[in-house]
Amino acid sequence: RFSSSFFGDDLFGSFGETGGESMRYQTAPRKEPPIEKKLPCTLEELYQGTTKKMKISREICDASGKTMTVEEILTIDIKPGWKKGTKITFPEKGNEKPGVIAADLVFIIDEKPHKLFTRDGNDLVVAQKISLAEALTGYTVRLTTLDGRTLTIPINNVIHPNYEEIVPGEGMPLPKDPSKRGNLRIKFDIKF
């Protein structure tokens, strides 16, 4: 048997009683809804990974309840292969108010358009304009990858309008295993 003072005097006393003071329970402080901000990233940043520093200013409360504005630098480590829509949460980095739990600050990865590549899941897609003669006689694709390497891809097949050359392992890194990559898909726009 426990002594009642070990758990406080009235641990079980208020359960089952009706009316009176014992039915008023202390409500937990309300938490503000999350604040979401877009974080635009280039395809190169999402390919190689990067670190972004975001300066925020927010209000904090001191012990007396006075609020003051502080500036903070948040560091966001963007991992290779992250996709648009990936969320990075900084718990309780919103404005503080007395009696309220500060909101979480959530950054959402957004992908800036790229002049050459488009992303399709873990694959990178590129369109090459070629002449009809090149389509019939063979063509060599020369591309600079997102990490600055030059790829030379000889196409030995006849290129028809829906032809797609797939280069395995030259797409985006897989977020769960960045040593593996999606495919590079080369599409052709034949000028007749």
Image: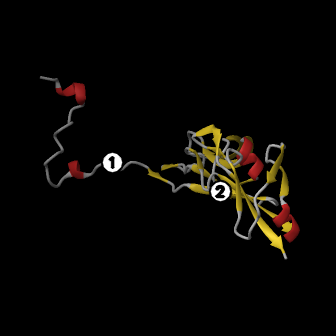
Q: Position of residue 134 (x, y in %)?
A: 86, 64
Q: Which residue is more in the foreground, 147 or 151?
A: 151
Q: Which residue is mark 1?
A: 26
Q: Is residue 2 above or below residue 121?
A: above
57 relative to 180, above or below: below
Q: Is residue 192 above or below residue 125?
A: below
Please give the name of the residue rendered at 59% of the width and 56% of the height, measured from the top-left corner: 35
From this viewpoint, is residue 67 visible?
no
From the image, which quarter does the N terminus lie in? top left
Q: Which residue ends up furthest to the bottom in the rendered image?
A: 192
Q: Which mark is residue 37?
A: 2
Q: x and y percent of residue 13 in the render?
A: 16, 40
Give the percent coordinates (x, y) of residue 132: 85, 71
Can residue 152 be seen here? The reply is yes
Q: Quadrant of the C terminus?
A: bottom right
Q: Amino acid at mark 2?
A: Lys
Residue at (22% x, 51% y) in the render = 23
Q: Residue at x 81, y 51 (%)?
A: 154
Which of the marked residues, 1 or 2, is nearer the chain's N terminus?
1
